[in-house]
Image: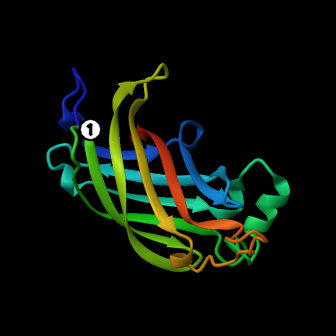
Amino acid sequence: MTVPGTAIENLTGTWTIDPAHSRFGFAVRHAMVATVRGSFRSFEGTLHLDGFRPTASHATISINTDSIDTGNSDRDTHLRSPDFLDADTHPTITFTGTGIKPGDDPDSYVVTGDLTIHGTTHVVEVAVEFQGSAVDSFGNSRVGFAATSSLSRKDFGLTWNAPLEAGGVLIGDKVKIDVDISAIRAS
């Protein structure tokens, strides 16, 4: 978790996710032949990094379910409905990191945490790659991470689907998660 010229110990502290420069995205199969991609536009989170003991680092993230955006307003309205996220009843998706261990490659980690979607919580593993640290043009210390995971919609009670005439179902069960985080050191 080092960048040339940057001591990992310098990353120790609390960092606030910058929503203007971060993305929480997803992808799921549609009609068995295509992939629908989307993201959430409203979220917040805090990273507590320990550069001396990276395995002591942890994170808390909250995503507003009504901010889902797939580029199709009719589909987004359906995804907010009780058939899927039920945004009125379950306004947030939350992730609380509970553990971290080194990954297979330098600058990579596996973060374990509690993910709550649609009122159901499961432990998930997220592959995280440290992207670097820098001071931006406004004097903010920044740190970046890329993260990926996958989950089963059914595990979180998201079971709505429609059979296809040729066989199969309209929406795949596996959801791929793709996250880019830019966080600013809290003062």
Towards the viewer: 27 or 124? 27
**Relative to residue 143, is residue 167 depicted above or below?**
below
Residue at 58 percent of width and 80 percent of height: 157
How far from the left and from the top, in percent, is residue 128?
A: 35, 48
Which quarter of the rendered picture does the N terminus lie within? top left
Which quarter of the picture shows residue 136?
A: top left
How far from the left and from the top, in percent, is residue 86?
A: 70, 75
User: Which residue is outermost to the front?
Assistant: 166
**Relative to residue 125, is residue 36 depicted above or below?**
above
How far from the left and from the top, in percent, is residue 62?
A: 53, 61
Residue at 33 percent of width and 42 percent of height: 129
Report how many numbered discs are placed on residues in the image: 1
Which quarter of the picture shows residue 123?
A: bottom left
The residue that disc 1 covers is 11
Q: Amino acid at mark 1?
A: Leu
User: Which residue is outermost to the left?
Assistant: 52
**Relative to residue 6, is residue 108 depicted above or below?**
below
**Relative to residue 183, is residue 124 depicted above or below?**
below
Which quarter of the rendered picture does the C terminus lie within? top left
What coloring was used for the rendering? Answer: rainbow
Relative horizontal placement of residue 51, taking residue 145 as reference (left or right): left
Towards the viewer: 121 or 170? 170
How far from the left and from the top, in percent, is residue 145?
A: 39, 41
Towards the viewer: 151 or 121? 151
Residue at 74 percent of width and 78 percent of height: 82
**Circle 1 residues within 10 Å: few <14, some 14–19, many ≥20:** many
Which quarter of the picture shows residue 134?
A: top left
- Numbered disc 1: secondary structure: helix
Residue at 47 percent of width and 54 percent of height: 45
